[in-house]
């Protein structure tokens, strides 16, 4: 790509840098014509778009090699690596290859099922057996392994049925003896001398229950929801939204707030839309299910999260049947992403064995359930199908691949309605005019490459010319501005394993993981605030929006586009928002003095008896702008709740009047004492070296004790230079708390954890979700110590989490068992 860019004439680059939405067709056409003359450009498109050059195609030889490695590991008792190799084999195994008379993919599923059973993952084992039977219903080992899994889960009736079927299908004498032995053992475990003949007449409704979670979620084709497992929320929504209406409005306030400082109106909110609440409510919950357009998993999560639903991948990963890239948590997600795989059931019509009528009925009911589970009427575009077996989805950035999915979805919909194909217009705002020359050039090149790759698959449906390329450029601009990060909450179990353990104790932690990117058309209507009044969260692909503050009629509903008060200082937030979204934020957090922005990066006053803050020049300049806006106020406009706290750190701002307010870098805002900022910065940098070293060693117990003693001295040094509520002090306290926990000193870990939370409360407020996440650490330590304070911490966590997640707390934090009463 860089070679192509370097070959572009300077005159064309200049023309592109000066382009606007009206001139885009001309610049796009010129660049396309130039590339079309270059042999290296055509070679690059060939490498990206053709299956014969793909690095993700299936390969039987590689699959057999991985299978052999898995067999060796399994024989040696190395179950973890055996699981890894069998999964890798499944990723590259062609679905139409037979080895020793058995389908290779079915064999690999049964082999992996054996490993999963050894690892105690019985439900996952059962699901792999189901997948093998979906390919070959007469596979004796699949029935046998399924019977073993059902036995381990206490499903003795089904287990006996499975083993009887396996016995009828097994050819070898030794195999039959093994199955007979298992049958006798199960009957003995079930305390039965004989098995009633009518017991094997299993009901289809029983099979479609929890035992078949991989395949048998009841997909309701007539529902307005694409994901019926969220339907229980529907009645809850009806209760919550009764009497509440939302309205999309156009206001002067939005124009002012999202204007760019150079005098141009921000293209991000060119339509000046926003969303307001037309009714008064303390609790408002919206579920954006149908409002989504398209999704894509982040590249860094491709190996760890499902490419369709974004949930963490289980041990029994389901790969795409046509390429080695896409991974899914279930066959259901695989089908939704790629479409129905009709070739996987070619051997599923007859068992080829003479079974009793009862066993025939049982096999029919089981295999019917399997087929019903995977034969889903497709309601939506198969977003991954056009990406199978080619390189460009793996090579190009995620937002470009996302644009490709949007274009293909539009093409498919146009075909369905018999309309001509054009590049879709999302009717969302973009910021093309505010882009720098380099970004404009990148969009031109990316659009041409993307359309060339899609043209290879869709031909005349996707023409490549100046008009279509310019539309693609604007689409990419819209994605850059309006796409939402799909963020899932990861909570570590408090009973087993990492992240932080001391002897037999284990602490719980909560972190947010950005797993994907999505376009929500309705979600784009919400404006930004660094102090939002709504909280967004995801369950799988469904976006939930919940009011976390009192929302009066006519008030705007505002979410955070990323930075918030307490997370970054005002100057850093402004810089990020202007770079990403091309507007200068003037929300209350950015236009009014607040405690968090004054203390987050502040220094300690030289006078030890003074609790005032000292700001450096970058912070002082931004905070002075807030003062200037309200220079006539007597006193300055400050939140009532923060007034007392502000007086302690910035008495001069709260007591002086009129034009005498002045924030000077290096001078205390309470007593006016001068501080040598250069010397203080040198102290901070020296202390941070050891703190950062401690952070890097949190996974290495053997060197932790020595580094920890040095880090404690550095922490004292840091506290001598920085204000007590500086965020760097909170972060250092947290690292020290983790280190003490790792070496088993839970009391000292608790003390430093509390110190960190005390600072964060000043920065974020006491009921912010960040405080809830940090309180999980503290509560788990208190639980290990058996302290009475644990109950108070648990109550506070539940209060914060309920405010932000409502009835979904258990779904968001399934592993934090101590949140529930009685545990």
Image: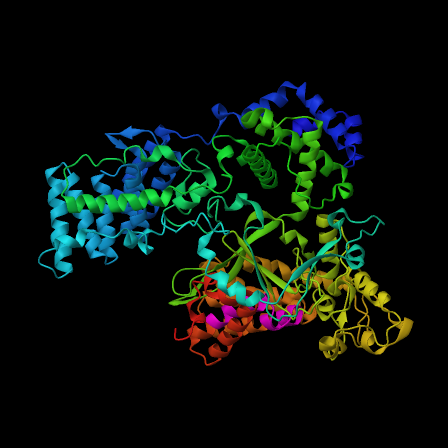
Residue 62 is left or right of residue 738, and the answer is left
Tell me, yes or no, whether the highlighted magenta stretch contains residue 762.
yes
State the extent of the magenta-drawn residues as a range.
757-780
Tell which of 60 and 808 is nearer to you: 808
Residue 257 is left or right of residue 173, and the answer is right
User: Which residue occupies 58% across, 21% down?
Assistant: 43
Q: Provide residue 736's location: percent of width, then percent of height.
A: 54, 66
Tell which of 808 and 437 is nearer to you: 808
Q: Is residue 752 visible?
A: yes
Tell which of 279 and 106 is nearer to you: 279
Magenta region's main secondary structure? helix
User: Which residue occupies 69% across, 66% down?
Assistant: 600
Q: Provide residue 399's location: percent of width, then percent of height.
A: 61, 41
Relative to 154, does residue 604 appear above or below in the rendering?
below
Tell which of 152 and 287 is nearer to you: 287
State which quarter of the image contains the N terminus.
Answer: top right
Which residue is the extreme one toward the left?
193
Q: Provide residue 265's location: percent of width, then percent of height.
A: 81, 49
Which residue is the extreme one toward the right?
659
Q: Provide residue 632's location: percent of width, then percent of height.
A: 89, 71
Q: Is residue 665 visible?
A: no
| Colouring scheme, one of rainbow, by chain, secondary structure, one colour | rainbow
How many labels sit on residues? 0
State which quarter of the image contains the C terminus.
Answer: bottom left
């Amino acid at each position: 790509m860089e070679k192509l860019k370097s070959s572009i004439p300077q005159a064309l680059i200049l023309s592109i840098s000066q382009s606007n939405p009206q001139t885009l067709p001309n610049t796009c056409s010129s660049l396309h014509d130039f590339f079309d003359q270059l042999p290296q450009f055509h070679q690059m498109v060939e490498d990206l778009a053709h299956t014969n050059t793909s690095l993700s195609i299936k390969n039987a030889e590689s699959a057999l090699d991985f299978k052999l490695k898995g067999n060796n590991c399994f024989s040696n008792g190395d179950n973890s690596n055996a699981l890894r190799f069998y999964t890798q084999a499944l990723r590259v195994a062609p679905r139409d290859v037979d080895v020793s008379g058995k389908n290779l993919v079915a064999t690999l599923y049964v082999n992996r099922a054996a490993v999963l059973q050894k690892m105690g993952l019985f439900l996952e084992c059962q699901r792999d057996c189901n997948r093998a039977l979906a390919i070959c219903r007469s596979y004796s080992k699949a029935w046998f392994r399924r019977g073993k899994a059902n036995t381990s889960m206490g499903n003795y009736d089904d287990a006996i049925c499975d083993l009887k079927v396996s016995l009828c299908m097994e050819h070898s004498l030794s195999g039959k003896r093994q199955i007979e032995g298992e049958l006798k053992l199960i009957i003995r475990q079930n305390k039965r001398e004989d098995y009633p003949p009518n017991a094997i007449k299993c009901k289809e409704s029983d099979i479609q229950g929890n035992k078949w979670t991989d395949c048998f979620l009841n997909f309701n084709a007539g529902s307005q929801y694409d994901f019926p497992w969220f339907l229980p929320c529907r009645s809850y929504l009806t209760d919550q939204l009764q009497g509440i209406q939302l309205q999309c409005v156009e206001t002067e306030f939005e124009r002012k707030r999202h204007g760019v400082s150079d005098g141009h109106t921000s293209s991000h909110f060119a339509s000046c839309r926003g969303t307001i609440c037309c009714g008064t409510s303390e609790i408002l919950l919206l579920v954006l299910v149908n409002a989504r357009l398209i999704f894509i998993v982040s590249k860094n999560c491709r190996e760890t999260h499902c490419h369709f639903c974004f949930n963490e991948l289980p041990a029994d990963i389901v790969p795409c049947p046509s390429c080695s890239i896409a991974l899914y948590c279930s066959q259901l997600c695989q089908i939704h992403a790629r479409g129905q795989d009709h070739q996987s059931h070619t051997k599923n019509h007859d068992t080829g064995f003479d079974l009793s009528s009862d066993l025939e009925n049982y096999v029919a009911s089981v295999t019917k359930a399997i087929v019903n589970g995977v034969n889903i009427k497709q309601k939506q575009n198969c977003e991954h199908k056009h990406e199978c077996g080619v390189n460009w989805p793996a090579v190009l950035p995620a937002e470009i691949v996302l644009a490709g999915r949007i274009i293909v979805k539009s093409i498919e919909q146009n075909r369905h309605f018999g309309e001509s194909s054009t590049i879709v217009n999302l009717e969302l705002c973009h910021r093309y005019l505010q882009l720098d020359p380099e970004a404009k050039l990148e969009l031109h090149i990316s659009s041409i490459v993307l359309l060339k790759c899609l043209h290879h698959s869709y031909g005349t449906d996707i023409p490549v010319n100046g008009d279509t390329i310019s539309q693609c450029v604007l689409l990419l601009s819209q994605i850059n501005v309006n796409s939402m990060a799909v963020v899932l909450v990861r909570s570590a179990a408090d009973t087993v394993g990492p992240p932080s353990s001391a002897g037999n104790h284990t602490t719980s932690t909560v972190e947010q993981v950005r797993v994907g990117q999505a376009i929500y058309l309705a979600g784009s209507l919400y404006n930004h605030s660094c102090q939002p009044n709504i909280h967004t969260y995801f369950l799988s692909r469904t976006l939930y929006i919940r009011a976390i503050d009192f929302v009066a009629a006519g008030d705007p509903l505002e979410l955070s586009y990323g930075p918030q008060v307490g997370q970054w200082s005002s100057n850093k937030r402004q810089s990020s928002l202007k770079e990403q979204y091309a507007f200068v934020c003037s929300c209350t957090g950015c236009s009014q003095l607040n405690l968090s922005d004054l203390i987050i990066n502040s220094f300690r006053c030289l006078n030890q008896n003074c609790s005032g803050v000292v700001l450096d020049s970058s912070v002082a300049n931004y905070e002075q702008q807030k003062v200037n806006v309200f220079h006539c106020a007597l006193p300055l406009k400050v939140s009532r709740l923060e007034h007392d706290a502000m007086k302690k750190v910035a008495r001069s701002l709260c007591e002086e009047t009129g034009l005498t307010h002045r924030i000077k870098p290096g001078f205390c805002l309470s007593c006016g004492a001068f501080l040598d900022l250069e010397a203080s910065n040198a102290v901070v940098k020296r202390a941070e070296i050891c703190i950062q070293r401690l952070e890097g060693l949190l996974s290495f117990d053997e060197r932790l004790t020595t580094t920890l003693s040095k880090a404690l001295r550095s922490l004292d040094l840091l506290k001598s230079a920085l204000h007590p509520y500086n965020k760097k002090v909170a972060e250092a306290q947290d690292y020290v708390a983790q280190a003490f926990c790792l070496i088993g000193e839970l009391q000292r870990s608790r003390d430093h954890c509390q110190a960190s939370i005390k600072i964060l409360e000043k920065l974020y407020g006491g009921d912010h979700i960040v405080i809830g996440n940090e309180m999980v650490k503290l509560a788990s330590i208190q639980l290990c110590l058996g302290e009475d304070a644990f109950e108070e911490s648990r109550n506070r966590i539940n209060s914060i989490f309920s405010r932000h997640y409502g009835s979904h707390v258990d779904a968001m934090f399934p592993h934090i068992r101590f949140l529930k009463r009685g545990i």
